[in-house]
Image (cartoon, helix red, strand yellow):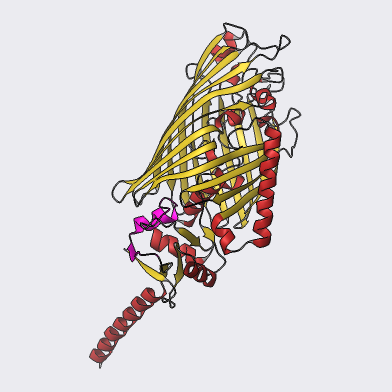
Amino acid sequence: MYKDIGINLIFLRLFLFVVIFISNAAFGVSVISHKSVDVKSLTTSQLRRIYTMRQLQWSSNVRIKVYVLSSNHLTHKNFCKENLRIFPYQLDRIWNKLTFSGLGVAPTVVKNQAELLRIVSTTPGAIGYIDNVNKEGHVNVIEIK
Amino acid sequence: MLLKLNNKTQCYKTILLLMLSFAFNYCVVANDEFDKTWQVHGFVAQGMINVNGSNFVNDEQNLSLKLTEVGINTSYQHSTNLRFTAQVVYLNGGNRYSKGARVDYALIDWTAYNDENWLVKVYLGRYKNNHWLYSSTRDVPHTRPSIILPQSLYFDGFRDIAMGADGIAINLNYSAESLGDFDFNFSYGSSELSSKEVKVLLGEHALGSGKKKFTAQASLNWQPEYSQWRFGLSLLDSDFNYHQHHQQDFFSDGTFSFQQYSISALFEGEYWQFSSEAFQQNFSQDGFFFPGFHQRNIGQGAYAQFQYKYNDQLKFLSRLELSYADKNDRNGKKLERKTDGVVPRYFGYQHDITLGASFDFNDKLRLQIEYHKIKGTSRLTPITAPNKLLNKNESWSLWALQLMYWF
């Protein structure tokens, strides 16, 4: 009997591991772009350059239009931590410096994820991020390596 | 129009009207298309400051509301590589710098080259000093760590000289997976100072005009890949001329020459931030007091600053700062002796211990408060004629509180 319980526990652990793995994959933050953007994957470093406004154009010479959620939004915090490996306040510092010294333009802040998805899907050159993409047909999903 | 700012009042009015019109459009007809080409941002901050023991803000040395900073900027993306942008600010800091509206920057921003690793940008027009940690946004309250920045490097008396100039600025950025980010900046330009700005710098009796003959600045910053540290060094070379107004002018023609070398380090952790800048300045003066007068000082200064983020809303700050007007006269005794006791020795240095806190009500509204305990008076205006009567004490202090909103 003890042996059966032991085997059941192993199966239970395996099951939980698979569930957690799938939910992480399914509910992590996805980087999305407009359909016209011909980029399938980016490294963390390249994504950082785009979000710190150091890379301003795609290789096709189309201007990159960067969209973000507000700094306090949980999805934004997760995106910074998981995809950019940077703290949200560091991005705020960089963007404030660009905005108020004339050096550049900060990303456009949108109200919520639905709005972000809508604007990325209708703006050529746009990039953004949302939780768990299920409307892949409207936007491209960029893999972050 | 952006480059030639001779008729200042007219220019301020034109740019302000344009910006208000854009802001109105932005508020009333903001839509996707508008957002893609135009951006409008701004800030409003009002505070109170109480200085005890010096005329840093006002001669009366009582509670003052002279802590006002207002600004509005707009940016227009003309094409993929070309952008136009300008900012107007209104400042009132009492004796710290001259009160009034200014065109803070007015630029043509040209992206000369951009690929996955390189970004080269050229700015033409009135640019801002982007070479020190906080120099480009020193008047933008929510971007700086404290209401009063370290006066050793961010001396308010030099604000209008150090802020920027009319000319050209170049930014070159390179990133590589293994080497990290490199940022190189170069700027070259000149500007004229208003009579108010000359008086703040040189004193009420300076009736003449001032012209910054040129300012050349260069800086290099490096952030190793995925590192929380960033390191920088910068160089500055500037000449400033004073022209005697007429025979009644107490001062004669003069030239002030200023060179500075500085290094910086910044650490940004999840809860802790550390920043430090250290510099050496050569300040030489020819003429001004009388033809043939010559004086050269080598000043030094540094600060170390810690910030602790208690949570998303509350942050604390502590800072230690040391500053010497002449590195060969750290206790000011030579200064006192040279002036036969007219200028007390404590005008030869200024050290500051600062404690502060800030609270964010939301992502656009902040309250900031701080206390400074200061020893010495070398960073008070005017620099050429220290006011001994109003600054009788070696030790003085100040507290300040400021409410700021930005969008």
Left or right of B292? Residue A125 is left
Quadrant occupied by the N terminus of chain B: top right
Q: Residue at x 38, y 77 (%)?
A: A23
Rendered residue at 71%/9% (across/down): B247
Quarter of the image for the C terminus of chain B: give it: bottom right
Picture coordinates of residue B144, whole percent (x, y): 56, 44
- Reply yes or no: does residue B14 show up in magenta: no
User: In the image, which residues are magenta?
Assistant: A37-57
Q: Is residue A34 visible?
A: yes
Could you say which is closer to the camera, residue B240 or residue B396?
Answer: B240
Point out residue B285 in the picture as x, y percentages from the top left corner: 55, 14
Q: Is residue B144 above or below residue A65?
A: above
Q: Residue at x 47, y 62 (%)?
A: A77
Q: How many marks?
A: 0
Q: Left or right? Give the position of B199 relative to B259.
A: right
| Residue B357 locus on image (x, y percent) | 59, 48
Q: Is residue B69 visible?
A: no
The answer to whether B107 is drawn above or below residue B302 in the figure is below
Q: Quadrant of residue B165?
A: top right
- Give percent across and percent down for residue B43: 64, 48
Depth order, front residue of B190/A44: B190
Quadrant in which residue B195 is drawn = top right
Q: Is residue A43 magenta?
A: yes
Q: Nearer the viewer, residue A138 or B180?
A: A138
Furthest-bottom residue in this view: A1
